[in-house]
Amino acid sequence: MKEECWILHGVHIGRLFTGILRYHSKGTTSSVDFDWQTILNPSVIGCFHTHPGNLLRPSQKDHRTCRSWVWSSGRPMVCGIKCPPEHVSFCFYRWSESKVAYQKLNSRLFGPLFIATMDIGPKLVTAISG
C-alpha cells in the first residue's frame, strides 16, 4: 500500500482549525513528495497523510517534517494521519526558542472538510528538540 497525502488549506484562529483537504498525491510505502513551497502559502494549515501500517501517531519522519514546517513558516501546523476508517490529528507549534511541541487535536473529517479544536490546560504536550 502506498502512502497518500493531502494539503490542508484553511484557517487557524485561536484554538480552532478549519479547512479542506486538497491536492491529493501518492508516494511510496513510506513517504510522499510534494512541492515544499506549498507549505509557505499562508492558506496552508498543514497536511493529512496515510500511514500504511495503521500507526495513528506521528512517526519520527513526521516529527522532522513538521518541525521544519513550523520553523520555516513561523506558524502552527496540523499533521493529520488517516488509517481508514480512523483518523487522528496533531498541532505542531513553537514551544520555545529552541523547541517545537505537539498536541493531539479534537478533530473531525466530513469528506474533505476538516474541523478541529485544541484543548487548553495541563494536557499532555510533547516537546521535541528544534
Image: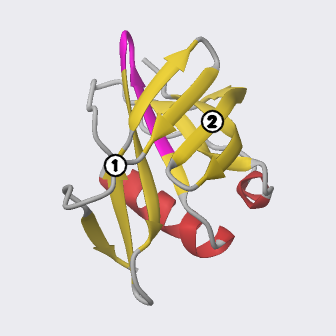
Range drawn in magenta? 79-86
User: Percent x, y for residue 84?
Assistant: 39, 12
Question: x and y percent of residue 67 in the render?
Answer: 47, 67
Q: Are marks 1 and 2 in contact (CB under 8 Å)?
A: no
Q: Quadrant of the N terminus?
A: top left
| Residue nearer the viewer, 68 or 80 | 80
Q: Residue 115, position in %: x, y? A: 55, 30
Which residue is found at the position 49% from the left and 40% from the top? 31
Local SS, label 1: loop
Q: Residue at x 21, y 55 (%)?
A: 123
Magenta region's main secondary structure? strand
Say what amino acid the circle numbered 2 marks: Thr
Instruction: Name the residue carrying label 1.
Output: 119
Residue that badge 2 annotates: 18
Depth order, front residue of 30/58: 58
Amino acid type, residue under disc 1 in the picture: Asp
Task: Give the quadrant of residue 60.
Answer: bottom left
Please identify the residue farthest to the bottom as the structure is shown.
97
* Residue 113: quadrant of the picture: top right
Q: Does residue 82 appear to the left or right of 35 in the view shown?
A: left
